[in-house]
Amino acid sequence: MSDELIQKLIAEFSPEHVQLKAKNVNKERTKCLAVPYLDARDVAERLTEVFGLGGWSINHQVVSEKCIKSTLTIQIGERTAIYDDFGYSDASDNQPGPEHLKAAASDGLKRCAVPLGVGRYLYRLEGMWCDAIPIGEKGTRPKPANLAELIKVAGKGKPASSQPPAQDAAKPEGAPPLAATEATGEQKKKRPLPRDKQVLVTEIAGLCDERGWEEKVVVQEVSLFAKRQIHSWHDMSVKELAAFRDHLRKPMGAG
């Protein structure tokens, strides 16, 4: 692939086109950690700009009611490149089935495009705490509509922070599903990972970040790879961790 195509693929999107979602929310649902993301239509437009209308295609295979395997095929001259990944639905549980599949398909397209550099820079941006707007009984969204508005809000006062405000120091909902420590014994003392496992887990975390995987996706992928439910890195042997790391090192779409 030429340098010109690469630069077009990795080019940043206009902040007005970068949307926001709430990742962590305080108990009162008045503050949230706003995380940037791209609309699948903007990703599709970028692929068309670079490869042309007939230069790329996407196929989806339903894995479950909330998961789809997506395969992106691009044509570069006489060469064909294939990238695949899994897309997951973040639609609320009360949404009908088609809405979950639609959300998973959009997620799958975006994940397949990450190895090409489309929107990859967004994964290096820290989330910002901002005002939140409750939606229904459980939903929450950031008050700023997009990254441009969030930047404006941050510029009016104190520098934006990735840490929760002191007055809203309640623990964010949810916790990392894969722990690097394990509670043992009656006193529930924390048992740290052995050094050899910690080195592998650190490398795995970096590879997962490169793919843009959130924690819930890491749990799904590592459990699928291990062919059993994984709750903690302690559940895997050094050999299994090394094999999973090597699996992640393969280019997306490789066997």
Image: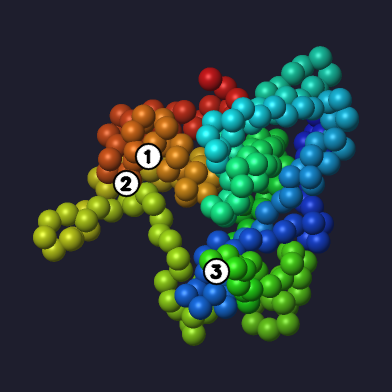
3 or 2: mark nearer the eye? 3
C-alpha gap between disc 3 and disc 1? 40 Å
Measured as percent of width and height from the top left, residue 252 is found at: 59, 29
Q: The N terminus is located in which quarter?
A: top right
Name the element at disc 2: loop
Measured as percent of width and height from the top left, residue 220 is found at: 45, 40
Q: Is residue 72 left or right of residue 23?
A: right
C-alpha gap between disc 1 and disc 2? 14 Å
Q: Residue at 69% across / 76% down in the picture?
A: 154
1 or 2: mark nearer the eye? 2
The foreground one among 136 and 108 is 136
| Residue 127, visible in the rendered structure | no
> Pointers 3 and 1 in contact (CB under 8 A)?
no
Q: Amino acid at mark 1?
A: Leu
Name the element at disc 3: loop
Q: Which mark is residue 200?
A: 1
Q: Is residue 58 left or right of residue 210?
A: right
Q: Residue at 12% across / 56% down in the picture?
A: 185
Q: Residue at 74% across / 45% down in the picture?
A: 40
> Pointers 3 and 2 in contact (CB under 8 A)?
no
Q: Which mark is residue 229?
A: none
C-alpha gap between disc 3 and disc 2? 31 Å
The foreground one among 104 and 10 is 104
Measured as percent of width and height from the top left, residue 47 is found at: 80, 36
Mark 1 or mark 2: whose residue is earlier in sequence: 1
Mark 3 or mark 2: whose residue is earlier in sequence: 3
3 or 1: mark nearer the eye? 3
Measured as percent of width and height from the top left, residue 200 is found at: 37, 39
Q: Which mark is residue 232?
A: 2
Q: Amino acid at mark 2?
A: Ser
